[in-house]
Image (spheres, rainbow, N blue to C red):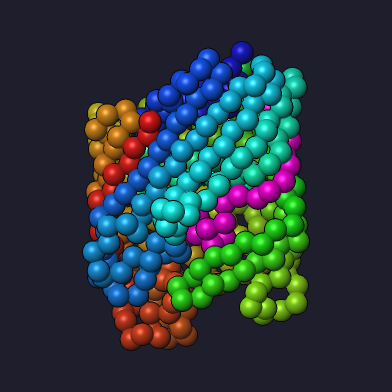
Amino acid sequence: MMKLSQIFTLILFSFTSTSFAAIEITDNFSVSGFGSTSITKSDNSTPLFVHREISDETCYDCDTIFGLQADWLITDELNASIQLVKRPQDIWSDPELEWAYLAYQYDDLTFEGGRLRIPLFLASQYYYVGQAYTWSRPPQEVYDSILGFTFYDGLSVRWETDISDDTAVTVSPYYGFERDNTTEIGPDKITFDTDLVAGIALDVSGFNYRVHFGFMHTQFEMIPRTEPFSKLNIYTLGAEYAPDNWHFMAEIQADNTQANWYLSGAYHIGEFTPYLVYGESHHRRKSSSITAGVRYDITYSISLNAEWQGVYMNSDDYNRFNTGQFVIPAKAIGEDKDAQLYTLMLNFVF
């Protein structure tokens, strides 16, 4: 019997026309794919957003994503999945293995091992699938808060149960093993020598809503080192609600160094979905943003977004060389503290 959490996922995917048209190779093996590309430009020469680095030069590949996923149902209880993604920060010849795991289901429990997606946010499981959400990009205030890290190598257990006729609960503790994660932030390359990752995700969902809580604890050294050893506790809370043609989402993320949140609303009118987003970042990054756009579903598997976004910072934070959503302080290169960003985005799945 299909669980309520699965039913809600189908409802939201239907709302945003994101059903995958997987290619059935055999009865138990399928391949699917997804991608995004854009034409985008801001009015500020300071690069915007982690790993995308959009500036005042028209960019045709700042958002380019292409992914392939293979799923193999080995037995009724055991399955394998692998996903390879060319992310915005990758070159085509060097994509990232975003997940590769075995999953075994026993009653209400699912045991997973391998490379797994960090389950911190509402959109974590489909973060790179632009067709699966309304906006051009997930709100940077929250989704860029952990510098673009999306996966861990380790183990998880997922317990799913229906606690009433209209409420389902999913609890997912997880543990990640030691590994190095390297990222580029503007001109700097930083390696996080991670000793461990451990956390838990909790979802409560019904026919048209979902509430998600995430917690992750990590211990790491940063190279070049700023201090010998660091510990970070990350907390997230998000909710989405889809009454009739509306779709509302809100999330907050907080850790030792920052607090970030956003609120989003969208309305589905035939093939068109206009939307608004407001977000704020505090402490480590200080900024706010307003996003207005419209999504047009060309078919059930192809969509087009036209979007404007304003990113703002107050003068005091700008004069203190705060980066906000820029990858380097705008003041350091004599640029304005604010930016207006324009995007035309194409998303697809197959």
Quadrant where the N terminus sits is top right
Residue for point 32% across, 45% down: 275
Seen in the image, is 330 located left or right of residue 180? left
The quarter holding residue 192 reads: bottom right
Report the span colored magenta. Answer: 137-161
Furthest residue toward front: 93
* 280 to 286, vertically: above or below: above
The quadrant the C terminus occupies is top left
Query: Quick check: 244 above or below 155?
Result: above
Camera sees residue 62: yes
Q: Tell me: 89 left or right of 166.
A: left
Pick whichever, 9 or 262, lies toward us: 9
The quadrant in which residue 269 appears is top left
Residue 342: image x %, image y %? Answer: 25, 59
Residue 248: x and y in percent read 43, 40
Residue drawn where x is 42% and y is 35% of the image: 33
Residue at 65 percent of width and 74 percent of height = 223
Residue depicted at x 69% and y 20%: 77
Visible in this render: residue 247?
no
In this rendering, the answer to whether 186 lies above or below 218 is: below
Is 151 within the magenta? yes
